[in-house]
Image (cartoon, rainbow, N blue to C red):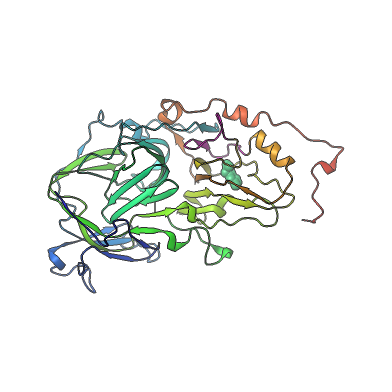
């Protein structure tokens, strides 16, 4: 029976704070004092460095951690490809993606309680290439089984931002443990080993894997020094280790192919760590939402939780944007999102409730469903929403109570996999037709007042 040790008696205690250096000891004195690799690290541990950026990355971008572990992670046998019949490997390869301009919407994706984390991953959309460290991959997942006993996973391809729509995930990572509940997100950076247990059975959600760079907080500019996702609300696990010399299986996603190896010790043997490269979680309910208190609908970038920047300033490979419950108070304003064509692609999901730009209900935008408005594809409120927003009395109104929609927005044209287009059987065939074709012209040359500004003078 493995022996388990936590930094604190509570296995789910966290360090609070993001973009900063943390240090964690599950055994007092396990971190060397004032140096990283003493000749003999405390307690006979091995020092191992995990580099999340190039050694030479500028200080403000540099991410790395030092781990003090029972055995180095190099102690394992040779990697072998996982036989494709064990996992539907083609569903991860992205070999079948198609870039299409159609607006797409998916009905809620099914639960699948028969599979575990790896069996439950479905690549829906992708752009770029892990080999060149460019782009992103978007998955939906549904699983009900814990990973096999003594099995752990990592992705060499990118940083996985997990949006949990339903259930609970118990994540054991090299850095410690994270309990993830619906309406929370976790980010597991490239290379970090973890396993996923499902203490409550069915779990479902979405993942945006960033092949390039790392997620960071957006600049706040004139908003000032607080607001949106606040630094202290990000939670980082505390050191946790087991003494376990049983045989473990490691699975690696390496250029979208699963490889497997074995070793006679647990990968979760990090007694202490310090650094800037670590997994973390964030509860979307803590987001400090900011909006217009005068007129007009602001750009949704004010709802950015995390951004994965491209090399072009202000342009993201992946922005993670949420639409939390909020008050709408704008005067003389069409309050839902405007009609739009975007140089960015917009993949949306819904964790719970309704999204104020779209009708819910059967055939609508529903929790656990999704939509994709690819580059320059027209979108915006459906006809029902347009009518309601045009006719409504503009009193202060709370929208989205109990709701949480989100968007993965990318500067890249994402392709959709065969699973996303066909095999999942969730594409709504009449999305476009039913959403926007009912819109009719209200153009009336003889009635300027039909759309005139109000008397507030803006
Ligand atoms: O509903 C969408 O498609 C996303 C979206 C939200 C918003 O507030 C403004 C523009 C936009 O595309
Ligand atoms: Fe848009």
Task: Say how many tags the image has.
Answer: 0
Residue 412 location (% of width, % of height): 48, 43
Q: Is residue 392 left or right of residue 247?
A: right
Residue 434 location (% of width, % of height): 62, 28
**Looking at the figure, which quarter contains the C terminus?**
bottom right
Residue 376: say if magenta. Answer: yes
Looking at the picture, does residue 106 appear above or below residue 36?
above
Q: Is residue 102 left or right of residue 280?
A: right
- Asked whether residue 45 appears in the rendered view, the answer is yes
Q: Quadrant of residue 443?
A: top right
Q: Is residue 445 left or right of residue 437?
A: right
Q: Residue at x 52, y 42 (%)?
A: 345
Residue 107: say if magenta. Answer: no
Considering every residue shown, the one lying at the far right of the view is 446
Residue 308 location (% of width, % of height): 44, 52
Looking at the picture, does residue 24 appear above or below residue 296?
below
Considering every residue shown, the one lying at the far bottom of the view is 34
Residue 148 location (% of width, % of height): 23, 39
Numbered range of the magenta stretch: 360-380
Q: Quadrant of residue 164?
A: top left
């Amino acid at each position: 029976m493995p022996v388990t040790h936590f930094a604190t008696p509570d296995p789910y205690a966290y360090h609070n704070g993001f973009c900063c250096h943390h240090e964690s000891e599950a055994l007092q004195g396990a971190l060397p004092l004032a140096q990283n690799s003493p000749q003999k690290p405390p307690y006979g541990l091995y020092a191992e460095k995990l580099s999340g950026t190039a050694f030479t990355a500028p200080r403000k971008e540099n991410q790395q951690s030092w781990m003090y572990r029972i055995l180095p992670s190099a102690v394992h046998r040779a990697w072998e490809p996982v036989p494709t019949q064990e996992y539907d490997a083609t569903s991860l390869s992205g070999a079948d993606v198609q870039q299409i301009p159609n607006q797409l919407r998916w009905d809620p994706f099914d639960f699948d309680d028969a599979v575990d984390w790896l069996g439950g991953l479905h690549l829906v959309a992708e752009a770029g290439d892990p080999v060149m460290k460019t782009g992103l991959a978007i998955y939906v997942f549904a699983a009900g089984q814990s990973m096999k006993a003594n099995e752990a996973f990592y992705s060499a391809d990118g940083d996985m931002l997990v949006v949990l729509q339903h259930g609970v995930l118990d994540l054991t990572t090299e850095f410690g443990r994270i309990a993830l509940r619906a309406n929370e997100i976790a980010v597991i950076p490239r290379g970090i080993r973890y396993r996923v247990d499902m203490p409550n059975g069915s779990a479902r959600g979405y993942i945006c894997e960033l092949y390039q760079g790392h997620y960071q907080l957006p600049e706040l500019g004139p908003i000032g020094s607080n607001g949106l996702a606040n630094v202290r609300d990000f939670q980082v696990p505390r050191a946790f280790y087991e003494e376990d010399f049983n045989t473990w299986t490691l699975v690696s996603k390496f250029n979208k192919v699963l490889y497997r190896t074995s070793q006679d010790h647990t990968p979760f043997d990090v007694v202490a760590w310090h650094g800037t490269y670590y997994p973390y979680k964030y509860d979307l309910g803590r987001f400090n939402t900011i909006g217009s208190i005068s007129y007009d609908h602001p750009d949704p970038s004010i709802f950015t939780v995390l951004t994965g920047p491209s090399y072009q300033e202000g342009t993201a490979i992946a922005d993670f944007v949420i639409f939390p419950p909020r008050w709408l108070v704008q005067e003389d304003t069409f309050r839902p999102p405007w009609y739009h064509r975007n140089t960015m692609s917009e993949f949306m999901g819904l964790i719970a409730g309704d999204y104020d730009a779209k009708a819910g209900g059967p055939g609508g935008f529903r929790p656990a469903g999704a939509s994709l408005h690819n580059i320059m594809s027209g979108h915006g409120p459906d006809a029902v929403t347009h009518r309601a927003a045009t006719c409504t009395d503009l009193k202060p109104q709370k929208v989205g109570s109990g709701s949480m929609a989100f968007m993965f927005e990318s500067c890249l044209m994402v392709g959709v996999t065969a699973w996303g287009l066909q095999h999942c059987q969730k594409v709504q065939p009449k999305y476009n037709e039913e959403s926007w074709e009912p819109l009719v012209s209200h153009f009336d040359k003889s009635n300027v007042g039909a759309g005139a500004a109000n008397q507030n003078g803006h």
